[in-house]
């Protein structure tokens, strides 16, 4: 083994795309920019230097458009819009003017591009929010490509043509186009030094089903081509040159998963019913329209949550009514009459401001600031465009509307007032829509849970957003490693909140769903059944797993366990009870 110092090296990163693979490293050395000297340009040569810059921008646009076409061919238009962010940067008049001004002051074109983008990237990298750090990577990527075109290297990475089958690509960073190329070359997976869950490369990897771990810091320095490597995209782990015991363990895990997957596939067309005949429904969560085609094939009863935020992030301008309509129609047409719950924009104004889409000052605490329904009510034009698109699409298939982050009755009624206005406008324009479209709300802040009995009388359904409900209730940011241990679905207060919300809904005659991560974890399925949850809305891969658990238990037993848990104030005892239920799940009726 040529890399003995890295034998059984275990690196922890970010799980960007699920799955486990074992292969051999192909180290893709990125086209790194050498240190750029600040060379002074004589006055007589500055106009030529400006032309060089503009020509490099044109060349880079051509490359980016090629990338866009490649992604569009592989994944469709919504993914292809990822490239629009880079194209938008290339067309930014401020960038063009500032770089040109620097050149006219005697700075070389290469250094002028580098100097302009360096300041912006550094300010974004200083942000705590991972989203902005990933946008810094976008800026660096554009800068790098322009500079390479300036020095006639045409912005290409080392070719992936030499990658063999069953390889795992390791790199400092990868572009979405690289990821598409890997799929074409049958690459098993990849690992990178930088990146996050919302990076463009991660989004494309998810769409293509390529297991990936990112944010590993120095994997490209530790690995060598030919090293044996394990990519665990479920846990965010990479193991270089694994010991025999670990290798065998993962081989067994892959084999076992293949067997389990085949067993789970048998559940696809079976109902989510307990042994004693109590039925619930299992729906799928999707992030973008391209995922809709897979929902029914996984055995879902429909889409329980379509997160519409994707349409905002991967573009250079705000989406208009047609954009919303096209995206929603693409979803419902894949559902063949099964219902789709569409959540209106659940994003913060800070994100739109940093993308240049809204003129807002940065908030000190955006998670508790102008976001979700609050943002939509403050900027009704943004809300109206989305509502018009959704309502028009409701004439093409079954759609239910979901408002996020409702905290009081006034917000709900204000949102409904805007909705009624949109309906009236569509009637006047003789544009068809579903007059009986159902409206629901996310219960994800503690104050909404406390008045859920009041809110239930105003809407057609509830959907519990446990991700935010837990972190707001516990005052613990779930991605902050210092307090992440406090983010606990089994805390007695959280379980009582869930029971309160479910009872409020049932007393008002409406169904209660759950679309947060807790709903998609089979460990919690038995207790959620006992608490009375009607619908589970989960990631597509979890649908058969949740069905499996439902079909392995009796509802009366689960209700009894729930009664015991609600009377128990000891968190550890609660976990013991839940574990005792899960130990008996081997009697599953597949």
Image (tube, helix red, strand yellow):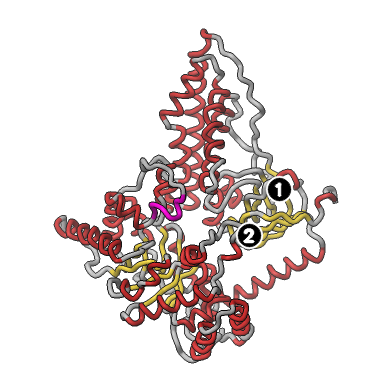
- Comes first in the chain, label 1 or label 2: 1
Mark 2 lies on a secondary structure that is loop
Res. 584 visible in picture: yes
Q: Secondary structure at mark 1?
A: helix
Residue at 34% across / 63% down in the picture?
Answer: 403
Q: Which residue is mark 1?
A: 219
Residue 369 among those drawn in magenta: yes
* Residue 294 visible: no
Q: Is residue 221 left or right of residue 316?
A: right
Q: Image check: 422 left or right of 560?
A: left
**Residue at (55, 9) in percent of width and height:** 42
For the residue pair 552 and 68, the one nearer the viewer reads as 552
State the image coordinates of residue 444 (x, y, percent, origin top left).
42, 66
Q: How many marks?
A: 2
Identify the residue at the far top of this view: 44
Answer whether labels 1 and 2 touch (C-beta < 8 Å). Answer: no
Residue 536 falls inside the magenta stretch: no
In the picture, the disc for residue 515 is none
Residues shaded magenta: 365-371
Check residue 233 in the rendering and tell me which mark sits there, or answer none.
2
């Amino acid at each position: 083994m040529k890399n003995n110092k890295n034998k059984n090296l275990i690196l922890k990163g970010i799980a960007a795309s699920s799955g486990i693979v074992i292969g051999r490293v192909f180290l893709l050395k990125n086209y790194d920019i050498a240190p750029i000297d600040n060379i002074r340009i004589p006055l007589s040569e500055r106009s030529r230097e400006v032309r060089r810059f503009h020509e490099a921008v044109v060349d880079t646009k051509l490359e980016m458009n090629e990338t866009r076409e490649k992604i569009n061919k592989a994944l469709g238009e919504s993914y292809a819009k990822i490239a629009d962010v880079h194209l938008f940067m290339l067309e930014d008049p401020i960038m063009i003017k500032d770089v040109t001004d620097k050149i006219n002051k005697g700075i070389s074109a290469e250094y002028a591009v580098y100097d302009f983008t360096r300041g912006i990237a550094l300010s974004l990298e200083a942000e705590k929010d991972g989203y902005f750090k990933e946008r810094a990577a976008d800026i660096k990527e554009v800068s790098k490509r322009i500079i390479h075109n300036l020095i006639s290297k045409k912005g290409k990475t080392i070719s992936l043509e030499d990658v063999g089958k069953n390889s795992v690509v390791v790199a400092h960073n990868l572009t979405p186009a690289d990821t598409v190329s890997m799929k074409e070359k049958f690459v098993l997976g990849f690992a990178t030094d930088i990146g996050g869950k919302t990076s463009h490369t991660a989004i494309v990897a998810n769409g293509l089903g390529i297991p990936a771990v990112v944010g590993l810091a120095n994997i490209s320095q530790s690995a060598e081509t030919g090293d044996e490597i394990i990519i665990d995209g479920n846990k965010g782990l990479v193991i270089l040159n694994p010991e025999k015991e670990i290798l065998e363990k993962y081989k067994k895990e892959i084999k076992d998963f293949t067997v389990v997957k085949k067993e789970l596939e048998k559940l696809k067309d079976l109902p989510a019913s307990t042994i004693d005949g109590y039925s619930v429904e299992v729906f799928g969560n999707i992030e973008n329209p391209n995922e809709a085609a897979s929902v029914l094939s996984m055995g879902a009863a429909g889409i329980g949550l379509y997160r519409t935020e994707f349409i905002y992030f991967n573009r250079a301008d705000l989406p208009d009514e047609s954009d919303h309509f096209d995206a929603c129609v693409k979803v419902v047409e894949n559902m063949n009459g099964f219902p789709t719950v569409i959540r209106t924009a659940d994003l913060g104004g800070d994100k739109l401001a940093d993308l240049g889409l809204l003129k807002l000052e940065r908030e000190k605490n955006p998670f508790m600031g102008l976001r979700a329904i609050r943002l939509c009510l403050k900027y009704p034009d943004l809300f109206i465009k989305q509502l018009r698109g959704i309502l028009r699409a409701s004439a093409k298939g079954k759609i239910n509307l979901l408002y996020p982050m409702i905290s009081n009755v006034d917000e709900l009624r204000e949102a409904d007032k805007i909705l009624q206005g949109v309906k009236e406008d569509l009637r006047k324009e003789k544009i068809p829509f579903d007059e009986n479209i159902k409206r629901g709300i996310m219960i994800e802040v503690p104050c909404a849970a406390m008045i859920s009995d009041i809110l239930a009388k105003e809407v057609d359904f509830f959907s519990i957003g446990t991700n935010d409900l837990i972190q707001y209730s516990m005052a613990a940011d779930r991605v902050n490693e210092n307090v992440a241990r406090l983010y606990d679905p089994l805390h007695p207060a959280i379980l009582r909140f869930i029971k309160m919300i479910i009872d409020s809904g049932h007393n008002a005659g409406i169904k209660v769903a759950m679309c947060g991560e807790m709903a998609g974890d089979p460990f919690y399925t038995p207790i959620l059944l006992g608490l009375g949850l009607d619908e589970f809305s989960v990631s597509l891969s979890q649908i058969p797993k949740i069905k499996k658990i439902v079909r392995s238990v009796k509802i009366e037993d689960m209700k009894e366990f729930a009664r015991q848990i609600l009377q128990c104030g000891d968190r550890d005892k609660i976990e013991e009870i839940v574990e005792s239920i899960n130990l008996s799940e081997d009697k599953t009726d597949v």
